[in-house]
Amino acid sequence: MSSTAVRHLTVLGEFKPFGLIAEALDGKPADDVPDKYDYFLFDPDTVRDRDETDDHDVLSSAFSDRCDHELFIRGNRIIWSTGPRVCKRFTLPSPVIKACWCRLGDMTKASLCVLQTACLTICNTSGEVVSIPVSEAITSIWPLPFGLLLQQAAQPSSTTYVPSLSSSPLFGESPSMSSVRRGVLHNRKEAGVSPQHNFSFASGIDHAVKEETSSMSSHLILQDPLEELQLAYIEERGKLNIMKEFDENTIWTSDRVPLMASYNTGKMQHSVWVAETNNLNLDLASANLVDAVPNGIIAKHCSFRRIWQGKGAKTAASKVFLATDDDAAPIICFLHQEQKKLLSVRLQSVEINNELLFDIKPDMSWSIPAVAAVPVIVTRPRATVGLLPYSDMLILAPENAILLYSGKQCLCRYMLPSSLSKDRFSHSMEFPETSVSQGLKIVGLTDAVEGRINVTVNNGQIYRCVLRRSPTSSLANDCITAMAEGLSSSFYSHFLSLLWKDGDSAYLSEADSSVHSEWDSFRSIIMEMCQSTATSKMVSNPVPQSSWEFLISSKFHDNFCKNNFIAQNSSVMSLDVRRLDASRLSTNSNQRIEKTFHSELLMESLHCLHAVYESLKLNNLRKRDLELLGSLLCYIAKFLGEEGYVDHYIRDFPGLSRSVGICEISFSKKSPPSLFRWLENCLLYGHDSANTNDLPPLICEEGKSVVNWARKIALFYSLLTGAKQIGKKLSSGIYCNIATGSYCTNEELTVLAMVGEKFGLQQLDSLPSGMSLPLRHALAKCRESPPTGWPAAAYVLLGREDLALSCLAQTCNSKDLETETNVNFISMSAPYMLHLHPVTIPSAVSDTNGLDNTKFEDTDSIDGSTTDGMEHIFNSSTQLRYGRDLRLNEVRRLLCSARPVAIQTSVNPSASDQDLQQAQLWHLAQRTTALPLGRGAFTLATIYTLLTEAFVVPKIVLAGRLPAQQNATVNLDPNVRNVEEIKTWPEFHNAVAAGLRLAPLQGKMSKTWIKYNKPEEPNAIHAGLLFALGLHGYLRVLNITDIFQYFRQEHDITSLGLMLGLAATYRGTMQPEISKCLFVHIPARYPSSFPELELPTLLQSAALMSVGLLYEGSAHAQTMQILLGEIGRRTAGDNVLEREGYAVSAGFSLGLLALGRGEDALGFMETLVDKLFHYIGGKEGRNQDRSISSTLSVDDNRAAAQMMEGTAVNVDVTAPGATIALALMFLRTESQAIVSKLSIPRTQFELQYVRPDFIMLRVIARNLIMWSRIHPSQDWVQSQIPDIIKNGVKFLGDDTNDIDEMDAESFVQAYVNIVAGACISLGLRFAGTKDGHAQELLSNYAVYFLNEIKPVSATSGNLPKGLSRYVDRGTLEICLHLIVLSLCVVMAGSGHLQTFKLLRFLRSRNSADGQVNYGVQMAVSLAIGFLFLGGGMQTFSTSNSSVAALLITLYPRLPTGPNDNRCHFQAFRHFYVLATEARWIQTVDVDTGLPVYAPLEVTVRETEHYAETSFCEVTPCLLPERAILKTLRICGPRYWPQVIDLVPEDKPWWTSGDKSSPFNSGVLYIKRKVGACSYIDDPVGCQSLLSRAMHKVFGLTTLKGPSPSSSGQNGPGSVTVDQLVGTFSSDPSLIAFAQLCCDPSWKSRSDIDFQEFCLQVLFECVSKDRPALLQVYLSLYTTMGSMAGQVTSDTVVLCDSLSVSNLKLALAYNEALLSGRLTSSRGGIVQSNFVACLRKQVEALLDCSQDLKDDFCNYMYSGKWPNVEESQGNKRSILLSWYLQWFCVPSPSAVKTAVDKVMPKLKSSSSLVPFLRLLFPKAHVNAITEIDKLFSSTDGR
């Protein structure tokens, strides 16, 4: 070992598991905690998200001292820690057998899998836990790349094991098992994990497992936490057998590659297996397998194929791990401690169809003496071998020496430091004072993580050591990595031996080496390689050893090389020639250097390091590294005689001509690759014309991290200039990673590539400014209208955070959104641009804006703080919607029932006044008790409940106050009125209204919260809450037990509210459990033997309606027969007054059941329709008493209860329900047959026969059936009225009219009911559409009826007058309010002002106006609520179910009092909730997070009534229905355009949280353009005249003005640059620069031109919204200024010519724009005249001075550079390098060779220019001309 280098380990400290410290900090452990513990350390990458790829450009990601992660296990507790911090603690129900990390299924993050007795627990990093019961025979678990491997021991034959959560009937399922399954499925739903292979093995193998235990598998696979355990198979000779090798004990698996190692105790052999998951396409081997697994059962399987076995080991290997051979082949290592050896087996991997196949060939194994071994990552820390890191082996030899191996090669020996004293470590560590090198021996190596290990010494102490400190020199790291990735294995092994050798110059030999010493160490190793090459002997005319060598040493070969040098220079010799040419020609062809091992190593090293050099050129931050590397490379190239390389480096850094010198002896004249040249040619001539030889070969190789930066830039330029993608590579061979998304242009493809490569704005700023221009151009071009469906990161890169947040909101919940935003966008967005954050729209809970003008303050109220249930309605959104008007305040005042009502009385009341007050209070109480219905609609889903708060219901106050008497309170006299009786149902409605406010967060309601609010004694308030929650669909949280607990209370109102709520929640599902609950409350359905229960009729009516909702649209035959019978049945009990309400409920229920199904529902429909027409009566009737003979036999158990009066059906009771049933059954069916039977009376006889209110129902029914014919015009309404009625009412006011008074009354009764019915039909047809024609028509009819009651305004038109003479006022009031209600249904949610004024007038009418009862007040209340539905954020739908729900709400029989439920149950009036849709949309400024106004262009599709139409709205607004909505577009000049294309579908609007929704809960994120104010700050746009304002500021701040005092900066109203920029832009960089421009020290500068330029650039950046151009403009300007200053003065600022290359790229970009190679609708991102100006200035600087001509002449003749030692020599050499780079001057040797070839063939007077232009097409004509002058004059001389 004497020849092996010796190094010292760096000791980090004494090791102690951090879990012990964490336990100590937690306090005293429990008594039952075992003493034994276990731990293991692991790499942070183990638990990293698999989508997070390391960015190799960031050195810290590969070289930082990352903390080791530790998993500490004691008993049933696990502590996961990172360094000195606890990440998570897991406490499990039983002791842990084994734990490991594994990635299961499609989960991107690793899960912790913990094996316990009979249980496998899987915990993910976010805290979700899934427990899976497993067999007690499972002894161990092991991670694989695709799942978890479970090994089980052999079981006794008496027991069988089902390897899954089997639901097979053969095995049954225990209650605990089913609860586990439910919990698992629930977790899956919440976690959003989608199984890929969801199939069951259990069902297929039940019989085999039952009968024969021999087919049991010894190994099982779990691929997903929620799938069945799968059997493992062995693949032998192409056939599959179930793996039954119980002696094959797994001893190791890899979680990166599918490999497993096992030890067979019986055969005493080790095996290596490859695991494969494939479809079952192999032959089934044994009969057992065929029996066990029938065909078609298994979709995929996991099989193991043995690739190696080794015998002779008596015990299993104590450790197995993967390492890497010196040629990058993976090796698997077995440590046999009893034999004290490490057996290494070499793997062979072949990639076929993107899959790695492993195999092992014989004689590919070797042994190394060892007692301990661990894999470490030391020699190639950033290199990878496929999915594996490049791992070395650290071995503890039997003689207690630690040796570092790379494959078979021993690199060095490690020792502990000579002493370990206390002062070297933290005070908490205890170390022996004495020298340890004498007495301590190393006895163990464990816990290796990357380059860190635990070293155990013989006194029992453990030290944490590091093999090499993370290097601080990024340049040295890059160079070593480049050689690791670029050199062949034999060369790199030699380099490693030099790198790790013993001695002073050894790389990182000392722990405290500095950055410079690291680079110096590396440089010295390269120099040593050069010296080794120099010692190679020089041979003169050696004897050729082969025919090939004879050929290449011949004179013919020499002449061939000379004559073809020009061609070789332009196209570079082919790869074959370079490989096979074994000699380098020297100037003296009689000698050559023998091509030795060292010279080839040095040549390959030059190529690798040159790739690093070219890559570093593309990074502004690595310029110093570039210069150091250039110096070293110039030395290597000079030594190798690479003239082209030497010239390349000196042109970049002219100072190298002095420090290194020029190449005097040239062995090769090939031109080195040049990335700048390649990028420039791409822009000028296109990708296909760029010479691929200008690309360093290392860039084109996949997985080379060190040149990743250069590869990305080359990739972007390639795509931008038209390169085609071939698989994962481009045609040039560059590997590409392009994000998913559609694209049409090269620019869009380039942006997707930038996203795929995680190349963001921060990286863009690191590029040289000229180089970044084409990429910024691509971003600018795509910014205006990027394609939809791009990843959110792409939009952030474009500066379209509005689209990014909208994109994210569709795919993430709020928690994921925040994580995604904060983590993944950092790579795309520069730190100073990272203003992206989740936008939360202020809700009622969180909105604390002080809205003074919306503060509700009733000046006459006693207590202004009383809760009225509407205090939350004011927030920033509603303020934006209604501006400064007080509409919402007025609505709140009108619907408030929690304050005493003002009563107008005299100042000195008398006794009669008190009676008057009580009368007024009673009339006002009718209005107050009706308000909750409207308030529920107004506050619908406007508040987010907190599950820790109690349910608050505002009070209903029936008292009054006397403003004339200092607001004295007057209560209703309980002796006169029964106050409590009239408050029962209003309390219910009040609770429903309060419950409807709730919009639980994320659509979830807690059962615990419902129970928390359940009172001890049932009451109407809790019943109302249950009903409201059911209408919202939140009662699914109640199970059948909870429901039963409510019903057993026998509280009618609670039962009623619960039934209706459950039916609304489970609407259309036919849920059996709910169905049973409902039918129990319909006594008519009891069996005859069942005792008859006395249930209230209301409860039965509610049950019937609930059945209809539950079975909605099902057309369930038996239930339809039942409901048909119930229409004609007398209710149980004596309450005959509610018979009609019961029949109407049955009719609605029957209609819902067959909603819109018409005659296609079932075969018996015709019979059913006939029965319904019998119930309606009509022309078929023969009885003048409006009852007909009935021969119907209803098949039911209680026929005696049928509603018969003798043998007649009471049509008065049955007709409304039957009419409604027919209307809903045939909704939109356009059935002419049904409509013809539902006729409107056309004769006086028929008018006498049909009740007028039934005529209204028939009109509604006819129009619902003939849906498409409803038209919002007066002509259509008139067409509904039969001629006899038209003629009858036409001349009512005419004295000559001879119509009989009775006939006139019947005509008018029919007329008003028909008109009202037509208006209700219009309301349903255009519900929620805000249709202007419908609104105008309904308003006109409302005013018409109002005038007929009491003239209030002049009306025009030909409508009949004087109706009130022939019809009672009550009928007119009802018709009026039904029309108004229909009007508000059309205008729902709009807050239409004209309509609101009408409603306010109607509400203000008092009892003196007569007939203002509870029913019409309820209608007004509902109408106000509808008009401001959900605070203006909800509206109605016109789907079938919505129309049915609205019809139930609008049923045209208004109650007479709060307790009147005779004709229609008042609770049904809340069913409008089922018809609502949140089609509200508001725009949020993504930069400020505030709601803003924005113009929105809405396009609706073509329908049968109108063509495709576009109209403009201003957000916030309500959108049209989904069935017609086609396109939304943010328009207007102030915001970036955004288009949302939708597919019109006849589906309900998207619900909150729906991931397919294009709107994030009604939020559209938009981004304001710079230079425009928001519409709130600047409604008319007068402040957005940016250019005028900026020029005004420039005029004020210019320093060229007549006098500084004229600037007026201190005057009132003056504006400064920073204030103006801050007004129009929120970009931090622009604001900071503007503040700099206003700084006094800035203004005192003398360079006025530069200050003017800065102001102009600032204006350019602000006006065009391109803040990044600030850096580009300033960089180009200052570069040009530095160059000019350097030419005119003696100071040297720029020591290189890289800035010239950068300027040339800017020019090439401009040329590409002008030539059309790059396209842009708005021109280039930098002004073309600015770039042209740069060109002129550079050419003016390089206009040949005499010194430059002389220097150029010397350079072309001899290749010599100006003597730097001379005065001005350094400056002249830099100027020469600029000239050569700017004009693309070829190397002197190339020019000489060309001239030598051309000159003999030219006449003396001919010019060389044409020929030189042909030979050097890229060289500038100025340079060609100078060369021509030079050689022509020489020839003349």
Image (spheres, grey):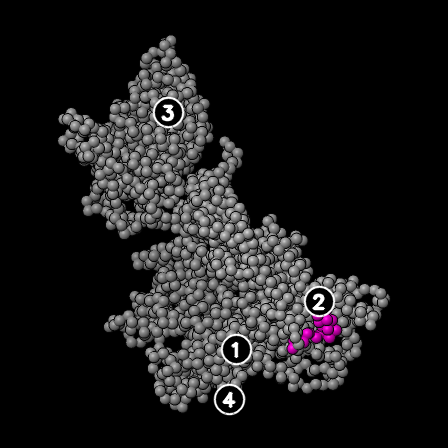
Which portion, as a residue range, is magenta? 1747-1765
Question: Does label 2 or label 4 sit earlier along the sequence?
Answer: 4
Find out whether residue 1208 is within the magenta segment. no
Give above or below for 399 relative to 145: below
Q: Secondary structure at mark 2?
A: loop
Find out whether residue 1761 is within the magenta segment. yes
Left/right placement of residue 264 relative to residue 731 reads: left
Q: Residue, x 38% and y 33% (percent of image)?
A: 1393
Residue 265 in view: no
Q: Residue, x 62% and y 84% (percent of image)?
A: 532
Q: Nearer the viewer, residue 74 or 1239?
A: 74
Q: Residue, x 36% and y 55% (percent of image)?
A: 186
Left/right placement of residue 4 relative to residue 1469 reads: right
Q: Nearer the viewer, residue 1342 or 241?
A: 1342
Q: Secondary structure at mark 1?
A: helix
Which mark is nearer the camera, 4 or 3? 3
In three-dimensional space, the C-alpha distance between marks 3 and 1, rounded to whole angstroms, equals: 93 Å
Left/right placement of residue 1750 relative to residue 764 reads: right
Which mark is nearer the camera, 2 or 4? 2
Q: Which mark is residue 1?
A: 4
For label 3, the residue is 1343
In three-dimensional space, the C-alpha distance between marks 2 and 3, rounded to whole angstroms, equals: 95 Å
